[in-house]
Image: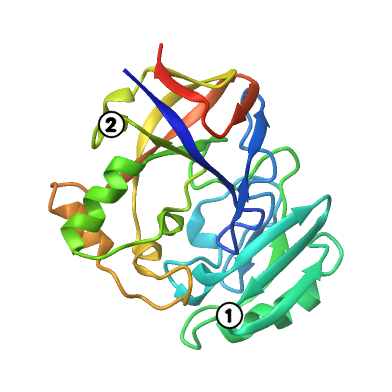
């Protein structure tokens, strides 16, 4: 049994926008190129930006739902951000921190730690996992959540990297410890992804409008998608085959 790649997404700045791709070339032991290159440390964070750190150190959609409505475009070292409540912003995160902090400030809740600085760990995307991961998500599982809630949802809520069609509901959970070939690449599936409040926010408006966590818990878990590690690099394109080795 096999599926096909239905969507590819990267998130240049962790929790601050997504960008659709037609193809990507992945490398062993690395995150998806251009994915979570930067992250935004908040004022209560003690990290110095020299190494990976857990998501609690960063501004993110679980605490600031309006961030979920950001779209992004990455071009070299320049990122363009757009949001329904803010003017478009094009800037270089490595050199133009202040203009970004001014732009994002109105999107942050007043009762949460303010965004304070942009961090980047060379050669290491700031995934939620403590190893460089790529997330795999199943459209059948997404549609099951929609059905449970009785409403249409954008898959963008889940912030996944590689989406696939044509496989059964929750099939991805059976992949733990197994190798999956996607296009030219091979990934080793390491763990399920436990979800947070970020997924309750509408990616068009930034307003919380769906009890995604309640829907997941109807299956006695709060997981959606799996984290995988690239063990053989190669190109992945839309419509490529997804199969268990």
How many other residues sit within 10 Å of disc 2, few (<14), some (14-19) or many (≥20)?
Answer: some
Q: Quarter of the image for the N terminus: give it.
A: top left
Q: Secondary structure at mark 2?
A: helix
Q: Looking at the image, which is closer to me, 128 or 35?
A: 35
Q: Is residue 87 above or below residue 200?
A: below
Please say if 76 is above or below 71.
Answer: above
Residue 132 on image: x %, y %: 57, 35
Q: Residues within 10 Å of mark 1 (few under 14, many from 20)?
A: few
Q: Considering depth in this image, is 198 or 23 the residue closer to the camera?
A: 23
Above or below, comparing residue 222 to residue 210 in the picture = above
Residue found at x 80% / y 69%: 90
**Which residue carries the number 1 mark?**
84
Of residues 73 and 177, which is closer to you in this image? 73
Residue behind mark 2: 173
- Looking at the image, residue 174 sits to the left or right of residue 91; the answer is left
Label 1 to label 2: alpha-carbon separation: 35 Å
* Residue 77: x %, y % from top left: 83, 53
Give whichever of discs 1 and 2 has the lower sequence position.
1
Q: State which quarter of the image contains the C terminus.
A: top left
Residue 121 in view: yes
Q: Residue at x 17, y 54 (%)?
A: 217
């Amino acid at each position: 049994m096999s599926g096909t790649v239905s969507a590819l997404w990267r998130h240049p700045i962790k929790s601050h926008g997504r960008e659709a791709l037609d193809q990507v070339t992945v490398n062993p032991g690395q995150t998806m190129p251009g994915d979570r290159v930067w992250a935004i440390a908040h004022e209560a964070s003690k990290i110095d930006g020299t190494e990976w750190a857990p998501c609690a150190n960063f501004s993110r959609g679980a605490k600031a739902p309006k961030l979920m409505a950001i779209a992004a475009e990455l071009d070299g070292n320049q990122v363009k951000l757009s949001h329904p409540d803010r003017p478009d912003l094009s800037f270089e995160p490595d050199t133009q921190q202040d203009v970004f902090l001014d732009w994002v400030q109105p999107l942050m809740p007043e009762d949460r730690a303010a965004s304070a600085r942009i961090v980047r760990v060379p050669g290491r995307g700031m995934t939620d996992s403590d190893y460089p991961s790529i997330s795999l998500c199943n459209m059948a599982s997404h549609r099951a959540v929609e059905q449970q809630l009785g409403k249409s949802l954008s898959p963008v809520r889940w912030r996944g990297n590689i989406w696939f069609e044509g496989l059964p509901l929750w099939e991805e959970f059976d992949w733990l410890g197994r190798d999956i070939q996607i296009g030219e690449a091979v990934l080793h599936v390491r763990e399920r992804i436990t979800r947070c409040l970020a997924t309750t926010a509408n990616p068009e408006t930034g307003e919380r409008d769906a009890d995604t966590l309640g829907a997941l818990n109807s299956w006695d878990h709060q997981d959606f998608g799996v984290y995988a590690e690239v063990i053989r690099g190669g190109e992945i394109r839309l419509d490529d085959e997804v199969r268990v080795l």
